[in-house]
């Protein structure tokens, strides 16, 4: 009898393709994680799973999702930080929810439709970039620990997105293959993050007509409320000339603006580290460093806090910090943003959050 595997099903082409790919080697069990009340494709997923002879379950995680994702998202923006909330969600909500359900059913392995690879090297599980570099999502998974990585299967890591669509279309799911990809946050339901924040926190409307200053502290214009801006942004600033946000003071609802060149930085400091390959950092290798998920990355070096040189993928440690030095200055690194470093074999070495 084939080993059972629990596959996360969202209703999209990637998760469905994952389930169908894995049917060759596993007995697939489908699980949809319900995060809100407005999901309208549950019945369609049930019918698809029935046609594939895949048992289908739904796990309601709305409470956990609100507490750990939506509230964190709000808190970060209210503190003038720019989070990549998907990395937090994968580590704290989605993967744990899948593992909890798998444990309740006596299932060892879980699978998702993320574009990344997991390999074993020197007794450890490592994340590696996907073959399809444009779709690579290893950045989104860097916070996963060894226990999570050891049970996770990612079959799309070695496949290009175009081939995935072609595969699922030939299997008779042409409608799914032609779905438009969504790049918005799943919980904003198509709204901009500004509209979502205003809906969740109506009091933010009182922050309109905030002050914009230059590097000398001189008042040069107004803005519509600090939570609606990030470093490097120019739209929405009411100034005489085109300027870019260079700093945000959330306590005073104050934004500093300057030239685009002022938004470039050669170093950042990060904490909440997830160290996957500390030895390579000790050896002073050069790394490819990404400050955004779709970032091509730039080369640079890493210097860890002196007392911390041990791998610690199991949990975050506030005391661990690292200085990232880029070979070429990067545009608009922002507080709260995730930074992920890769070795020359495309494996994740380290990830953390800009302080």
Image (tube, rainbow, N blue to C red):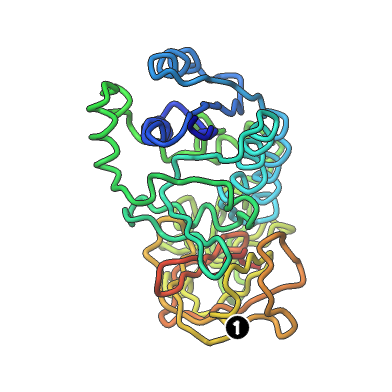
Dividing the picture into quadrants, the one containing residue 324 is bottom right
Return the x and y of residue 9 as percentages of the image width and height: 49, 29
Dividing the picture into quadrants, the one containing residue 20 is top left
* Residue 298 position (above or below residue 249): below
Front position in the image: 342 or 88: 342
Residue that carries the numbered disc 1 in the rendered image: 303
Identify the residue at the far front of this view. Answer: 1
Front position in the image: 293 or 241: 293
* Residue 268 position (above or below residue 243): below
Q: Is residue 213 visible?
A: no
Residue drawn at x 44%, y 61% as measured from the top left: 128
* Residue 346 position (above or below residue 185): below
Residue drawn at x 52%, y 33% as measured from the top left: 8
Residue drawn at x 45%, y 19% as measured from the top left: 45
The mark tally for this picture is 1
Return the x and y of residue 255 as percentages of the image width and height: 60, 61
Mark 1, secondary structure of its residue: strand
Left or right of 18 in this view: 202? right
The residue carrying pointer 1 sits among few (fewer than 14), some (14 to 19) or many (20 or more) residues within 10 Å by Cα, namely some
Residue drawn at x 44%, y 78% as measured from the top left: 329
* Residue 268 position (above or below residue 28): below
Front position in the image: 65 or 211: 65
Front position in the image: 140 or 283: 283
Tell me the quadrant of the picture where the C terminus can be found: bottom right
Q: Is residue 86 visible?
A: yes
Return the x and y of residue 100 as percentages of the image width and height: 69, 36
Left or right of 179 in this view: 78? right
């Amino acid at each position: 009898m084939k080993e059972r595997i629990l596959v996360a099903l969202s209703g999209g082409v990637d998760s469905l393709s994952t389930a169908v790919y894995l049917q060759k080697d596993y007995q697939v069990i489908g699980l949809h994680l319900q995060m809100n009340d407005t999901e309208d494709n549950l019945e369609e997923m049930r019918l698809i799973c029935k046609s594939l002879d895949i048992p289908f379950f739904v796990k309601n995680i709305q409470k956990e999702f609100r507490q750990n994702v939506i509230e964190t998202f709000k808190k970060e923006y209210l503190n003038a930080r720019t989070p990549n909330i998907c990395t937090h969600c994968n580590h704290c909500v989605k993967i744990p929810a899948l593992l909890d359900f798998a444990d309740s059913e006596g299932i060892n392995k879980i699978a998702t439709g993320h574009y990344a690879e997991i390999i074993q090297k020197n007794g450890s599980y490592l994340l590696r970039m996907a073959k399809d570099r444009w779709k690579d999502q290893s950045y989104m998974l860097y916070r996963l620990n060894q226990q999570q990585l050891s049970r996770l299967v990612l079959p799309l890591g070695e496949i290009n997105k175009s081939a995935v669509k072609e595969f699922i279309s030939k299997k008779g799911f042409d409608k799914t293959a032609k779905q438009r990809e969504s790049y918005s946050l799943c919980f904003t339901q198509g709204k901009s993050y500004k509209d979502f924040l205003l809906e969740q926190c109506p009091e933010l409307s009182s922050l309109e007509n905030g002050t914009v200053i230059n590097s000398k502290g001189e008042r040069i214009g107004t803005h519509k409320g600090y939570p609606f801006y990030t470093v490097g942004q120019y739209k929405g600033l009411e100034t005489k000339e085109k300027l870019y946000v260079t700093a945000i003071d959330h306590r005073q609802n104050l934004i500093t603006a300057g030239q685009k060149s002022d938004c470039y930085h050669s170093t950042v400091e990060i904490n909440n580290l997830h160290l996957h390959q500390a030895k390579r950092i000790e050896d002073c290798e050069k790394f490819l460093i990404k400050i955004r998920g779709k970032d091509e990355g730039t080369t640079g070096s890493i210097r860890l806090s002196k007392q911390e040189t041990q791998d610690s993928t199991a949990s975050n440690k506030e005391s661990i910090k690292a200085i990232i030095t880029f070979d070429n200055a990067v545009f608009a690194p922002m507080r709260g943003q995730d930074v992920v470093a890769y070795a020359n074999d495309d494996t994740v070495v380290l990830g953390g959050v800009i302080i």
